[in-house]
Image: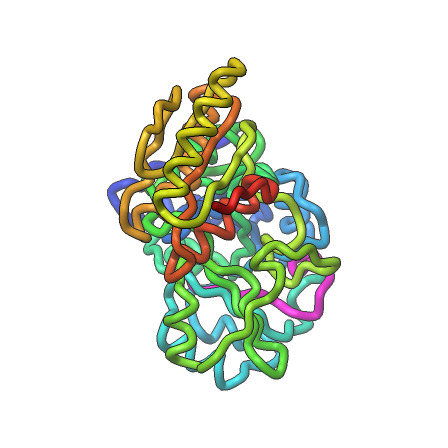
Amino acid sequence: MTVVINMRDGVDERKIKVAARFILEGKLVAFPTETVYGLGADALNASAVRRIFEAKGRPADNPLIVHIAEFSDLERLAREIPREAKLLAKRFWPGPLTMVLPKAEEVPDVTTGGLDTVAVRMPAHPIALALIRASTPIAAPSANISGKPSPTLAEHVVDDFYGRIEAIIDGGETKVGVESTVIDLTSESPILLRPGGLPLEEIERVIGEVKIHPAVIGKMVDVARSPGMKYRHYSPEAQVIVVEGERERVRRKIAQLVEEYRSKGYRVGVMGTEEYGADEFFNLGRSEEEVARNLFKALRELDKRGVDVIIAEGVEERGLGLAVMNRLRKASGYRVIRV
């Protein structure tokens, strides 16, 4: 039995205590952050963390992000904290930024996917922060079956996990819609491992140039130092095709693809700014923020509407657009048409 705890009206301390007790007992609780919903367990309890991997069907070498509520928690989890980490934490925490640092001995290997580093962030959501403060640092990947689109509504978590975990906190729709940005601070130079809800440009204004890991643009890796680097992610049941390039060429190509697939008897969905004569359409919005917030919801919704093919409009790779294109390319299995 899964308990769904309604906190759409904000933090309820009595209900937080119930959820925190689940965490401290080694159970699993899904909860909202500003990015997506997380599937949480006590980060320092190895057996509880293993349940996350089991519930999600997640490969054991895919590390988790540990969520904290105070900077002092970082001092407990990381063996050392470089100057860049302190600068970034002061500027962007709480917020959608994860930092990879050398891990302390107290952190179980299962939490870090067997790596000697730990990924840590402080979420900017009152429910998440209240839950952590009432319990312990919480390991939490996105609350979806491994490989599926991430959840931005409690209903998405219910679809994937009802009856399989102890509790789901319903805090309404998440604001950012894509996961946190992940920066590796264990090398000589900072490295972007995953673009996300904090644009790279803002990070570089604080610590200078950040290198971009090849996995960000699609190169496969043998060792995943961050979630989202090695395995298939964000994929709906329908086949996804991404069309990117010059605006007018993209429009013409999508219209052509819709006509071709429909003529072959496929139900076609389009996610972007125009319908293009598709069977189903999800308007992602015009601004970077709207597109990011709606991205995973669109993939899940078009699946529910029974389409066979989803054709997605590409966006410019600046600001949040870098994260959007990273997710779209992964969702498509790199079925990308450039025009």
Instruction: Name the residue located 48 percent from the left edge and 38 percent from the top edge.
Output: 167
Q: Nearer the viewer, residue 287 or 14?
A: 287
Start-end of magenta stretch? 110-123
* Picture coordinates of residue 232, whole percent (x, y): 63, 44
Image quadrant in which you'd find residue 130: bottom left
Instruction: Name the residue located 39 percent from the left edge and 55 percent from the top edge.
Output: 316
Please tell me whether residue 92 is drawn above or below residue 80 in the rendered image. Answer: above
* Picture coordinates of residue 295, whole percent (x, y): 40, 42
User: Is 20 colored magenta in this rendering?
Assistant: no
Q: Nearer the viewer, residue 187 or 58?
A: 187
Numbered circles on residues, count: 0
Please tell me whether residue 86 is drawn above or below residue 153 in the rendered image. Answer: below
Position of 1 with respect to 251 (left or right) is: right
Q: Indicate how the structure is coloured in the image.
A: rainbow
Please tell me whether residue 184 is drawn above or below residue 215 in the rendered image. Answer: below
Q: Residue furthest left?
A: 9
Image quadrant in which you'd find residue 122: bottom left
* Picture coordinates of residue 278, whole percent (x, y): 38, 23
- Visible residue check, residue 17: no
* Picture coordinates of residue 72, whole percent (x, y): 47, 75
Instruction: Name the residue located 44 percent from the left edge and 22 percent from the top edge.
Output: 259
- Visible residue check, residue 207: yes
Image quadrant in which you'd find residue 299: top left
Q: Nearer the viewer, residue 154 or 148?
A: 148
Instruction: Name the residue located 49 percent from the left edge and 45 percent from the top edge.
Output: 328
Q: Residue furthest top?
A: 265
Q: Residue furthest bottom?
A: 83
